[in-house]
Image: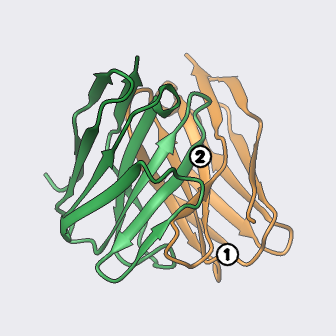
Amino acid sequence: KQEVTQIPAALSVPEGENLVLNCSFTDSAIYNLQWFRQDPGKGLTSLLLIQSSQREQTSGRLNASLDKSSGRSTLYIAASQPGDSATYLCALSGGGADGLTFGKGTHLIIQP
Amino acid sequence: DTAVSQTPKYLVTQMGNDKSIKCEQNLGHDTMYWYKQDSKKFLKIMFSYNNKELIINETVPNRFSPKSPDKAHLNLHINSLELGDSAVYFCASSQGSGGSKSPLHFGNGTRLTVT
């Protein structure tokens, strides 16, 4: 059974800093990995999707990496802004029709 | 707007009642899902469904049942509601199943409170 762990559970940093969010998983037989953000009272917004054959994906100030062999993914946020404050969730697909397995998220606060 | 929309946004009801949450997607996706987010914010799959296959998480009580009138809709029916059913329920869709290259698109959630 796949287990997904996100560290840290919460993070508060001043505006402008670069930061890294971590995601680890127990079963390396994944099809893809997604990073989402969730704002309070809202649904999830997909940020980046990495296929199992890929090592990283970039979108603007966000960069996500995937290392299947070590069971790890990181989300790098450059030049953080207060608008980046949200909960960031890592989720993995095993390739079946049974949806994604989520971590519990990292609650990020960017201080102005 | 293209999106996954679910109604109602809030649902407050008493124990023992039967209720439904509706979900519609106009993204042309062929797979839809229901997720439950508990009080600790942990998201867990309940169902995934396309026109070929319904996958049910074994931990979901049979009081919960998905109903799909067509590819664009997947409604969630809940019978005999219990206090522990209080949570936020999210609908989602994707093109292809979990093994696809398509990211999941989520609705904004339905906050269910059972009193």
Image height of B59 relative to B93, above or below: above
Percent x, y for residue A74? 71, 54
| Chain of residue at mark 1 | A
Asked whether residue A16 is in view, the answer is no
Farthest left residue?
B1
Figure coloring:
by chain
Chain B drawn colour: green
Decide which of tag 1 and tag 2 comes sooner along the chain.
1
Mark 1 Cα-neighbour bin, 10 Å: few <14, some 14–19, many ≥20: some
Q: Which percent across, then down, holds residue A51?
A: 58, 76
The residue positioned 47% from the left and 70% from the top of the image is B55
Estimate how packed mark 2 is, as few (under 14), some (14 to 19) or many (20 or more) residues with alpha carbons within 10 Å: many
Q: Is residue B75 left or right of residue B54?
A: left
Left or right: B5 as drawn, with respect to B101: left
Q: Label 2: chain?
A: A
Q: Is residue A111 visible?
A: yes
Whether A86 is drawn above or below B98: the answer is above
Q: CA distance from mark 1 to mark 2?
A: 16 Å
Question: A13 or A36: nearer the eye?
Answer: A36
Amino acid tagged 1: Ile
Q: Quadrant of residue A55?
A: bottom right
**Residue tagged 2:** A89
Residue under label 1 = A30
Which residue corresponds to the image point at 51% horizontal and 79% vertical from the top-left? B99
The amino acid type, in three-letter code, at marker 2 is Leu
